[in-house]
Image: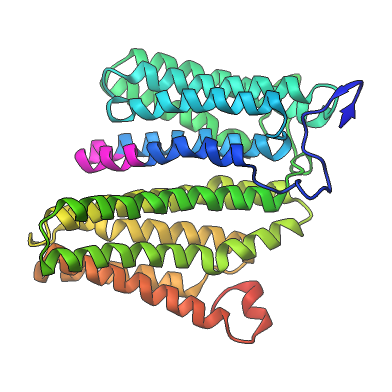
Amino acid sequence: MVLGGRVSWLRAKGGKNESKVSFVELFFDLVFVFSISQLAHSLAEHFTPLGALESVILIFAVWWVWVFTAWVTNWLDPDRMPVRIMLFVLMFAGLILSSAIPDAFGEKAIFFAGAYVFMQVGRSLFTVYALRDVSPANHRNFLRITSWLVLSGVFWIVGALMEGEMRVGLWLAALAIEYSAPALGFRVPGLGKSTAADWDVSGAHIAERCALFIIICLGEAVLQAGKTFAEQPVSPLIVAVFITAFAGTVALWWIYFQFGHERAAHRIEHDDTPGSLARQAFTYAHIPILAGIILSVVGDEFLFAHPHDQADMHTAAAILGGPAVFLIGNLWFKGVTTGRPPLSHLVGLVGLGLLLFTLPEVVVYQLGILATAVLVVVAIWEFASLTRVVPSARSTGDH
């Protein structure tokens, strides 16, 4: 397609490939399989309040660099050679970023921050260049976005050069800048601000991209369970723990994919302001979904490592906290896309909260079984509610 006297790198609007996820996008996502694995292992090894805070910072950063790339490839066509090369360069930088995760708050801070800033600013500058003369509104959008990312990049780099609390504080400030920017319309003096009407996204594409990312996260849970099971001497207890971990992951998949993803994709495709809905449902609401899966992977590690230990708040923070954070994310996601948060998810959160009262009476593997049972009940409840022949239920949420 030629626009303005040169070949356009934009996706063709209205074509069969407008919402198609390309193979190069899937290839790009493979780097984040490594990222999720690194995040889960790092959190498991430093499962303290400070370790949790540091992991939250890293999770927010990894998600942000991925989701910004997903938005960019919503407009730019990955089958165009310059766009494809851009994604390959980002993959390499993402590999450096992922490798630095375990020691991001140590000696490899500059590698993590440098790779992150390079990916964010470099991708945005490339998009500014790609959109010149062919999409004036989005060209200005990405000029604004680049300005915000350059500002936050200063905090990332300076934070990497500091140590301890100073680094944590500066990186939190960087995240605050980046996460508030979309809500503020990326307002920049002289460039104005973006509006919801400017973000003419393909809802089906952004929905599928986020769904594939969730598959990556769930895949890490399955791989971790299988790897740990293969390394353990076989016993009835280990088999029971393995089944529990797998069933819990299946329940997480069921809760997200059975109805949530399908309805969200349909809703955003028919919304008057798809950009605004995509920002809420996919850019922000998926963060606790991602965090919940990573925390559940940590909970599975505790199940295998200490099945006979007395359950306490430390282990419950992962075994119960992972499913709880995941359900909170789905409540947000489904509430935004249907207008009505599912009752089954609210009851599931209550059920997980009540399991805290069992801590003096159960050991770790028993707590894991109970947490998985709650997730299975939530999945079955939603499935039973939304498969009834009740049109309003499919459009608004379960009963």
41 magenta-colored: yes
At a point 32% along the width and 20% down the height, the residue shown is: 166
Instruction: Please give left or right for residue 106 compared with residue 343 in the image.
Output: left
Q: Is residue 386 above or below residue 258?
A: below
Q: Is residue 49 above or below residue 98?
A: below
Q: Is residue 147 above or below residue 59?
A: above
Residue 7 image offset from top left, x and y in percent: 84, 24
Q: Nearer the viewer, residue 291 or 1?
A: 1
Number of on-image labels: 0
Residue situated furthest right in the rendering: 5
Mark yes or no: residue 230 visible: yes
Q: Nearer the viewer, residue 185 or 140?
A: 140
Residue 6 image offset from top left, x and y in percent: 87, 21
Res 159 quadrant in image: top left
Residue 398 image offset from top left, x and y in percent: 54, 77
Q: Nearer the viewer, residue 33 or 186?
A: 33
The colour scheme is: rainbow
Res 150 quadrant in image: top right
Quarter of the figure with the N terminus? top right
- Per the picture, the main secondary structure of the magenta-coloured stretch is helix
At a point 70% along the width and 51% down the height, the residue shown is: 203
Residue situated furthest left in the rendering: 309
Instruction: Please give left or right for residue 250 compared with residue 151 in the image.
Output: left
Q: Which residues are magenta?
A: 37-52
Q: Nearer the viewer, residue 120 or 158?
A: 120
Res 344 quadrant in image: bottom left
348 magenta-colored: no
Residue situated furthest bottom in the rendering: 389
Residue 300 image offset from top left, x and y in percent: 25, 56
At a point 69% along the width and 40% down the height, the residue shown is: 74
